[in-house]
Amino acid sequence: MSIAKIIQKNLKKLLFIYAFVVLVICVNAQTTTRIQRMNDIFFEDYRALVNDTSIKNGMYLKKYKDYVIERGSFRNNERFGKWAYFSLDGIFEFEYDHTERKIVKISTKHNPEEYLETPILFYGSPIIPYLYMVRNIVYPSDAKNKNITGKVGLAININKTGKVTSFYIKEKLHPLLDQEVIRVAKTMPSHWKWIPATYHGQNISSEYLIDIQFELIEKGER
């Protein structure tokens, strides 16, 4: 059978498929709208349903200042497919497949065998929990008056199901500052999610670390 006859025989089928694809694209374009807004300190750019803009459906982009920190897609308000997450200055941190529920790539790992062990990852850009801590901590006046500066290392215990079980100070500085860090840590949003650490493909309990730097700048203002 000649190529012309094959094309002619399948022309109706090809036209139907083409029409269906065009229809899906048109329907999707008509049922979603682009939203651009500031959400606290973050800029969001995404597609949402026309009849309910609280439901994200399509591409999604989150920025902090001028840098992209999250990039992926939503389907009916749920993340799906591969998402890329970045830290300060838009530096790539990791990629996660939300459909397959697995880590695709981590910036510090280059060989397949390195992925036999993976660390706890925040279910989003790692600067989100860091900025939450920094913005909510109040530098104790007594610590300022005593000129106490330095780093406090916060450890968040995450179990194998991705739940926060406890907090503790892994690197202590001074009781006043250590207690303030713990106080703020306990106010972290309960809806936040964490990707548990793994060892040889199995989820394990581990620690997520956040370093908080206390500095006295210009008349003691933080």
Image: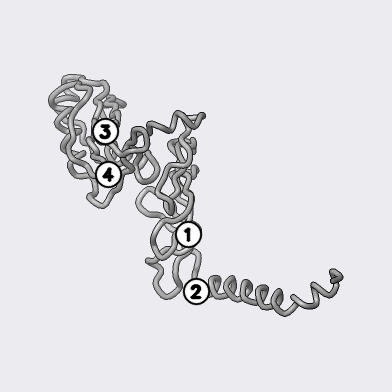
Where residue 50 appears, as percent x and y from the top left, is: 45, 73
Q: Nearer the viewer, mark 2 or mark 4?
A: 4
Please report whichever mark, 3 or 1, sits nearer to the chain's N-terminal start: 1
Residue corresponding to mark 1: 46
Residue corresponding to mark 2: 31
Residue corresponding to mark 4: 162
The CA distance from mark 2 to mark 1 is 13 Å
Q: Which of marks 3 and 1 is in front?
A: 3
Q: Is residue 130 visible?
A: no
Please report whichever mark, 2 or 3, sits nearer to the chain's N-terminal start: 2
- Badge 4 vs badge 1, beta-carbon distance below 8 Å: no
Residue 91 bears which disc, if any?
none
In depth, the one of 211 and 14 nearer the eye is 14
Residue corresponding to mark 3: 206
Amino acid at pointer 4: Gly
- Badge 2 vs badge 1, beta-carbon distance below 8 Å: no
